[in-house]
Image: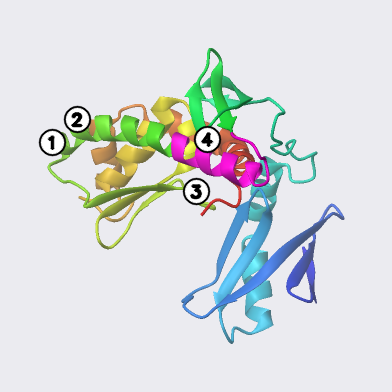
Amino acid sequence: MAQHLEGDWLELTTVRGGSIRVLKSPHPRARRLRLTVTPKGARVSYPQGTHPAQISAFLRSQAEWLERKLAELDLLARPLPPLRVGVPIRFPWRGGTARLDWAEGPFPRVLPAAEGFTVVIPRPHTRALPMARGLLASHLEAQMRRDVSRWMAAYVPQLGRAPTALRIRPLKSLWGSLDTRDRVNLDLALVLAPPSALRYVLVHELCHLKVRSHAPRFWAEVAKLFPDWREQRAWLRVNGAMLKAELDRLVAEVD
């Protein structure tokens, strides 16, 4: 895989003659090189002052992983149709699909419908799309928080540990994390997944309260609470890029 610098991008040429563009992103607080791939493309972040040769060597070492992730995302394929006010769409929902419809009303809200949700937008529609995205983000987070809170009530006593907080928001590449303050962070895209996949990620992060690494004893803790973790991890590896792309379509540009 060859490479050459082009502005803020590093262009990689694959052994098959294809081309991959990786956004270069210096970060003042970065301590190491990091490569991430999202539905928007590939990005390499690095500490300021890193020599270009180090960046190129790092990308060569990650070439196989990068090509695999890009293949999973299928970034060269036609992107998902954008979210448009008044245009119904279907999207993945808890192992099946749901329909998103639109209606006009006196105040903005999301209502349950027979096959999914209806987004109600008042007139005038001057900021209808940002309003709709915010409504959807709040609605999806509330649904996910209800599920996770119910499951945590069962898992925490078994584990003998409890997180200090639960934060749910779109994450670029991770499904979840446990920070140094014992706060569990979960990717909002998991609300679109089958409940069992969401439960696996929750258990994964809760078990890090006991074992911070991925040592064998960590996986033993996961297996105690969720014996089918391997199946759900495999499902996310196959379908994860699709979920993140779908969430991005629904709530993009929502902080």
Q: Which residue is mark 3?
A: 170
**Front residue of 186 and 121:** 121
Q: Are marks 3 and 4 in contact (CB under 8 Å)?
A: no
Per the image, label 2 sits on a secondary structure element best described as: helix
Which dot marks residue 108?
4
> Residue at 44% of width from left, 28% of height from top?
231
Q: Which residue is mark 1?
A: 157
Q: Are marks 2 and 1 in contact (CB under 8 Å)?
A: yes
Which label's residue is closer to the chain start, 3 or 4?
Answer: 4
Badge nearest the viewer, 2 or 3: 3
Count residues near mark 1 (Cα–Cα under 10 Å), then give few for <14, some for 14-19, many for 20+: few
Which dot marks residue 154?
2
Which label's residue is closer to the chain start, 3 or 1?
Answer: 1
**Amino acid type indicated by mark 3:** Pro
The residue furthest top is: 114
Badge nearest the viewer, 3 or 4: 4
**Amino acid type indicated by mark 1:** Pro
Question: Could you tell me residue 168's position as x and y percent?
Answer: 40, 46
Mark 3–mark 4 Cα distance, whole angstroms, equals 22 Å
Q: How many marks?
A: 4
What's drawn in magenta, residue-wise? 122-140
Left or right position of 241 against 231: right
> Residue at 75% of width from left, 70% of height from top?
9
Mark 2–mark 1 Cα distance, whole angstroms, equals 6 Å
